[in-house]
Image (spheres, rainbow, N blue to C red):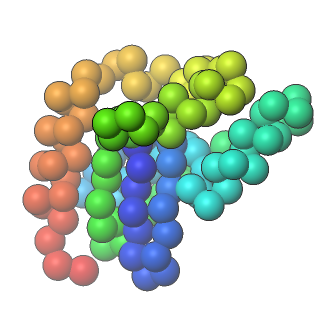
Amino acid sequence: MVVTLGNPRDKFWGMILSLAHEGLSMRGVELASFEDLIAMVKDGEPFTPAVVFFPMHRIERIELDLPDGSLPSLSQRFSAKTGLNPDAAFGSSLKNRFTEHTETATISAALRNKGPA
């Protein structure tokens, strides 16, 4: 997932741990640090993905990490450059519990119920 945040503007890439009316919990990295993360993993350095909570009023957009035409997804880029599956690297099997349809429906419902900030 890629989450776009406002106030301050930022993007975060990772896996959803929890999505509720109050906000979103994720495990991952700031998108600005994506290439640094890949370099660390390739060099065999230990890393611990951040576990963060974003209140719903900061969330502007949540996107599935999908390829765009000939451009690979961030997950595909991570795998191609490190040889690791992001699910395994982030130590979470949550993605396997949900289908793409269920994730999309849940995210859409949460954003609809977001209410005023």
> Left or right: where does residue 9 sit relative to residue 23?
right
Q: State the image coordinates of residue 23 (x, y, percent, origin top left).
A: 35, 59
- Along the line of sight, the residue nearer the viewer: 70 or 76: 70
Is residue 92 visible from the viewing direction of this image?
no
Which of the image's four quarters has the C terminus? bottom left
Viewer-proximal residue, 13 or 115? 13
In the rendered view, does 30 fall on the left or right side of 105? right
In the image, is residue 93 above or below residue 63? Answer: above
Could you tell me residue 115's position as x and y percent? 14, 71
Asked whether, in this view, residue 15 is left or right of residue 35, the answer is left
Residue 40: name its quadrant.
top right
Q: Quadrant of residue 3?
A: bottom left
| 101 relative to 34, above or below | above
Q: Residue at x 19, y 29 (%)?
A: 102
Instruction: Name the residue at 56% across, 56% down.
Output: 31
- Where, by quadrant of the figure, is residue 1 drawn? top left
**Direction front: furthest residue:** 70
Image x and y of residue 73, in percent:
44, 36
The number of numbered discs placed on residues in the rendered structure image is: 0
